[in-house]
């Protein structure tokens, strides 16, 4: 059981910490920029579209704000399930009269999954303080879970690459539940699997959907970090527990 301090506010008696992955523990932009770039390049090749003309547009449709080097706060990438990102690419290709756009997107997304598995050193960059926080939590014997809109297998791969698989008790992606964030399904699945009730659990995330998910699941608290998609003032509308990043969360 752990006690937490966030901006001088104490949250006591916590047995379960659930973290979002991208933007909370892992650098959001670095990971998704490279993934979307690879997808867009291959889609242009498959549909015989000039990359110079269409790659940037495809990346934008999937949620990359290239000029400002960030993800779009409305997503879809990094915020909404993979199927929504895939559909955004498909719709763009259909406008370019690409035949069988849906099948091509499905195949290319799967291909990039395989390719990227061998380049995690380029894709997966932990945010400052993230790994230290997980180690501190584990020392208290509290449980740790990951809840992400990414596929479970992809998230597990990233956790394994970071060498923290022994710290994380369960990883749940959007493919494991019927309804993704902000529905409470992921957190209910995690709580049931680890036998920890919501009154002894906290959610930590960088997006409004993370915080709302914690509220919907009736968790004791939802902690917002400003290291990802959402501005502080937007997060403050949902929770009083706000930190610049996970390194500012204190255990004990």
Image (tube, rainbow, N blue to C red):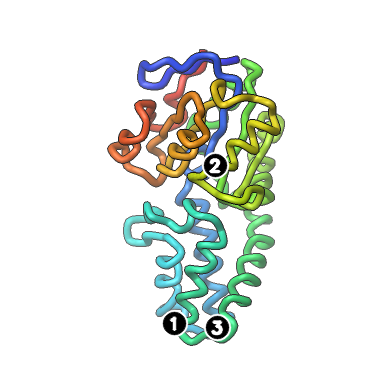
Which x, y percent locates residue 37? Answer: 50, 65
For this orientation, the residue located farthest to the left is: 233
Q: Which residue is mark 2?
A: 21
Residues at marks 2 and 1, CA–CA distance in whole angstroms: 33 Å
Which-is-in-front pick, marks 3 and 1? Answer: 1
Task: Please state, as top left, top right, bottom left or bottom right, where the N terminus lies in the image.
Answer: top right
Q: Is residue 168 above or below residue 89?
A: above
Front residue of 230 and 14? 14
Which x, y percent locates residue 165? Answer: 69, 35
Q: Which residue is mark 3?
A: 47
Q: Is residue 84 above or below residue 5?
A: below
Q: Is residue 136 visible?
A: no
Mark 1: give few (<14), some (14-19) or many (20+) Cα within 10 Å. Answer: few
Q: Is residue 166 left or right of residue 11?
A: right
Q: Which mark is residue 175?
A: none
Q: Which residue is mark 1?
A: 95
Query: Residue visible at 45% across and 58% down?
Result: 76
């Amino acid at each position: 059981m752990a006690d937490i301090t966030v901006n001088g506010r104490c949250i006591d008696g916590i047995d379960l910490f659930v973290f979002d992955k991208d933007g909370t523990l892992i650098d959001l932009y670095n990971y998704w920029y490279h993934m979307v770039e690879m997808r867009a390049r291959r889609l242009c090749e498959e549909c015989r579209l000039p990359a110079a003309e269409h790659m940037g547009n495809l990346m934008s449709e999937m949620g990359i704000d290239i000029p400002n080097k960030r993800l779009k706060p409305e997503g879809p990438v990094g915020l909404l399930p993979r199927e929504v990102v895939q559909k955004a690419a498909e719709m763009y290709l259909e406008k370019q009269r690409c035949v069988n756009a849906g099948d091509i997107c499905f195949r290319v997304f799967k291909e990039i999954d395989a390719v990227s598995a061998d380049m995690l050193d380029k894709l997966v960059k932990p945010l400052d303080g993230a790994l230290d926080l997980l180690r501190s939590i584990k020392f208290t014997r509290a449980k740790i879970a990951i809840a992400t809109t990414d596929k479970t297998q992809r998230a597990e791969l990233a956790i394994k690459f970071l060498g923290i698989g022994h710290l994380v008790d369960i990883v749940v992606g959007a493919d494991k539940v019927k309804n993704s964030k902000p529905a409470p399904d992921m957190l209910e699945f995690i709580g049931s699997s680890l036998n920890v009730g919501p009154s002894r659990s906290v959610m930590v995330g960088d997006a409004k959907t993370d915080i709302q998910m914690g509220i919907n699941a009736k968790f004791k608290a939802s902690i917002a970090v400003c290291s990802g998609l959402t501005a502080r003032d937007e997060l403050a509308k949902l929770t009083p527990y706000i930190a610049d990043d996970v390194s500012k969360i204190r255990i004990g």
